[in-house]
Image (cartoon, rainbow, N blue to C red):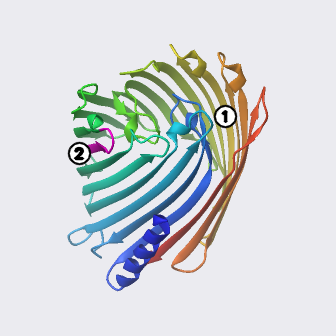
Amino acid sequence: MWGPIATIIIFLVALSSLKSHALILNTFYESGERNTISQFDEADLDYTYEKYSLKLNEALQKQNIKKDHGRITYSFGYNQESRNYQAGSTDLNNTYHEVKNKLEYQKEEGPEKRQAALIFDYKTKDFRETNTDNYNRIIAGIRAAYRNSESHLVRVAAGYKNYRFINNPSQDEDVFDGKIEVERYFGDLSLDAAYKAAHSTDNTFGTQSSGKLGVRYKRWYLNYLDGFRDSRGEEGDFDDDYRYSELNLGTKQPLGEKIAVALKYTNIQKQYLTGGYNNSGYEVSKSFWYYATKYFYGKLDLSYREKIYASVTSLTYYRNAIQLSLRYRVRTHLRLGLITKSTTYRFPCASSNNRTDKSIEALFAKQLSKMLSLELKYRYQIRDYVSSADVLRPLFRIGLHARFR
């Protein structure tokens, strides 16, 4: 209910400010089915969902980013999603509402670019079957960056998270964090390093640190990350804190005027602070692009993943995936897309979960006027289980993009 009301309010605000400000509005409604394994590996659960999203960007100053005193923009976002899990996991059924606010300053002058932003987000999450994990969350933060395209980049950030559990105050938590990242350019070579520290009032969490080291040479890159994550702040509906180490190696290379190829290898290890979900794994992926014309291109993605669980062996799996994407654009007025994908999962210790997901997805986007465009997306997916009946998992999305000047 609140989604459509918020849209009407934002449109009224937009119309009242047309004479002085530039404004962009994006909104969409989406419904379908997902599986948690595509978001976080520590579960293999199906759920249906409905999501409404709205985002507004408004330039509070009309100055060009490269002239005068820079440009200030304000962005507002609202997300609402309702999830219903499969039988046996209905205690995870939930609805969340989220409001995002960002005030940003940008200025470019020659090779230099400066950015600064203030962030304030609010989220409320209600578990409908059980209420002990219901919470309200506030995020406040500040970010700044300075980049000289000829020599270096520096980013700094500081933030505060506040979790308040309505029916279980013993879980209340405050998190303070800070981050700094530095990148140095030496012609075709660049070096990257980052450090983040976070302190929580939760004794299990305590004080944790994260780091990153990276190197990029021409079209190749290598980076290593070691740190800590709180799954409560991610997309999932579980609350499991873990440390991780991750290694990424990749490249993207042109193979002529119309063909390009990308290769990537990822190795990741997770160590949970509580529970027995410690795991390790790797993924190898290849992508091929074919640019037939200025308005049409195709892309083929191939990947293989292994995920090994030391204790909960039933979650160990091997995955093969192949996806073909075709895109066609008629200038800025019309975009068409078609995506076909096949993903095979093999669970060596839980063979009843072996399956192949086959899907086809169609995209249609049309500019209706100078100010308004429409986007439609539909996906038809069949989950083909080796030892049980097939499952249909559709997805539908409708979106609007409006630009006012």
Q: For residue 276, which quarter of the picture?
A: top left
Residue 94 point in image, percent of width and height: 49, 46
Asked where in the image residue 165 lies, by quadrant, the reply is top left
Q: Position of residue 214 (x, y in %)?
A: 35, 31
- Tell me whether the residue at label 2 lies in contact with that at label 1, contact meaning CB atoms closer than 8 angstroms: no
Camera-nearest residue between 186 and 231: 231
Whether 329 is among the magenta residues is no
Q: Is residue 218 above or below residue 327?
A: above
SS of the residue under disc 2: strand
Which amino acid type is shown beneath numbered disc 2?
Gly
The amino acid at mark 1 is Ala
Mark 1 Cα shell of 10 Å, populated few (<14), some (14-19), many (≥20): some
Residue visible at 78% across and 26% down?
387
* Quarter placement of the C terminus: bottom left
For mark 2, what is the residue? 159
Q: Classify residue 171 as left or right of residue 248.
A: left
Residue beneath the point at 65% across and 59% down: 377
**Circle 2 crowding by C-alpha within 10 Å: few under 14, some 14–19, many from 20:** some
Q: Nearer the viewer, residue 37 or 166?
A: 166
> Is 123 placed left or right of 2 in the picture?
left
The disc at residue 368 is none
Q: Label for residue 321?
A: 1
The residue sitting at the top extreme is 310
Question: Which of the two marks, 2 or 1, is nearer to us in this view?
Answer: 2
Inspect the magenta stretch and tell me whether residue 166 lies in it. Answer: yes
Q: Which is more N-terminal, label 1 or label 2? A: 2
The magenta region covers: 162-168
Residue 190 lies left or right of residue 146; in this view the side is right
Under circle 1, the secondary element is strand
